[in-house]
C-alpha cells in the first residue's frame, strides 16, 4: 500500500510539471438546484459573500483522505492528494461525467514509479468540494488510474488546507 501511495505522489508531481495548459473542456450543465441553497425571494440591495463551510476529512484506514467532489457539476469520489500537482480523473469518471477526451489521443505526459504515465490534459469547467468552487481547473485524464485525485490545481486555489493528526481541513 505504501508503494501505491508513493506512486500516486510521484505521478501527481510529474504530471503537474509536464501538463500544458492547452485544451479546454466544454462548459457543463450547472449542478442540480437541490445541491445549491435556495435563493431569497428578493435579494438585499447589497449581499455579503457566501462563505463556504469548513470541510473536515478523516484519514481512512489506508492512510488517504477522500472527499465527494462535483466535477463539472457531476459527483466524483476523489483522493485528496496534497502531493499531486494536478487534478487527475480516471478514464471511467471522465467518461461518466462527460469530459471530452479520446484514448486514441493519449500520450506519455509524465513518469511515475512504475514508468511512463499516459493520458490527456484537459481543463475542467469547475471543481467543487462542499461549496468551495474553483473554475477553469487544469487536469488530466489518466490511463490506469484507480481513483480520481484532487491535487494542487484545485487545492492551491481554495483558502487553506491543513492537516492535524488524522484530520484534514479544507477552507
Image (spheres, rainbow, N blue to C red):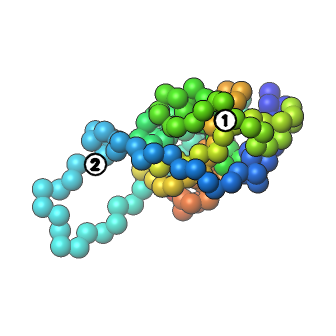
> Does the rendering let one see residue 61?
no
Give the residue at mark 1. Answer: 105
Horizontal relation, residue 73 to residue 66: left or right = left
Say which of 57 and 70 sits in front. 70
Which quadrant of the view contains residue 159?
bottom right
Say which of 18 and 37 sits in front. 18
Dot placed on the residue nearer the N-terminal end, 2 or 1: 2
- For label 2, the SS is loop
| Residue 41: percent from left, percent from top | 12, 56
Please tell me whether residue 100 is drawn above or below residue 51 in the rendered image: above
Please tell me whether residue 89 is drawn above or below residue 82 in the rendered image: above
| Residue 114: percent from left, percent from top | 86, 32
Give the residue at mark 2. Answer: 37
| Residue 168: percent from left, percent from top | 61, 47
Neighbourhood count class around disc 1 (C-alpha, 10 Å): few under 14, some 14–19, many 20 upward: few
* Picture residue at 51% right of the left edge, 34% below the top: 76
Neighbourhood count class around disc 2 (C-alpha, 10 Å): few under 14, some 14–19, many 20 upward: few
Say which of 63 and 67 sits in front. 67
Residue projecting furthest to the front: 104
* Picture residue at 79% right of the left edge, 43% below the top: 110
* Picture residue at 69% right of the left edge, 35% below the top: 106
- For label 1, the SS is helix
* Picture residue at 83% right of the left edge, 36% below the top: 116
> Does the rendering let one see residue 84?
yes
Foreground: disc 2 or disc 1: 1
Say which of 107 and 1 sits in front. 107
Residue projecting furthest to the bottom: 46
| Residue 158: percent from left, percent from top | 54, 59
Horizontal relation, residue 27 to residue 143: left or right = left
From the image, which quarter does the N terminus lie in? Answer: top right
Amino acid at each position: 500500500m505504501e508503494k501505491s501511495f508513493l506512486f500516486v505522489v510521484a505521478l501527481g508531481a510529474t504530471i503537474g510539471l509536464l501538463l500544458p495548459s492547452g485544451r479546454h473542456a466544454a462548459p457543463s450543465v450547472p449542478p442540480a438546484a437541490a445541491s445549491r441553497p435556495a435563493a431569497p425571494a428578493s435579494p438585499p440591495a447589497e449581499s455579503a459573500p457566501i462563505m463556504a463551510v469548513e470541510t473536515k476529512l478523516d484519514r481512512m484506514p489506508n492512510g488517504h483522505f477522500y472527499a465527494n467532489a462535483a466535477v463539472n457539476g457531476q459527483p466524483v469520489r476523489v483522493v485528496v492528494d496534497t502531493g499531486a500537482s494536478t487534478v487527475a480523473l480516471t478514464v471511467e469518471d471522465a467518461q461518466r461525467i462527460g469530459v471530452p477526451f479520446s484514448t486514441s489521443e493519449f500520450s506519455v505526459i509524465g513518469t511515475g514509479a512504475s514508468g511512463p504515465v499516459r493520458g490527456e490534459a484537459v481543463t475542467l469547467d469547475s471543481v467543487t468540494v462542499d461549496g468551495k468552487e474553483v473554475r477553469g481547473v487544469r487536469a488530466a485524464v489518466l490511463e490506469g488510474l484507480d481513483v480520481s485525485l484532487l491535487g494542487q490545481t484545485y487545492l492551491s486555489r481554495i483558502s487553506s488546507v491543513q492537516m492535524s493528526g488524522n484530520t484534514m481541513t479544507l477552507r
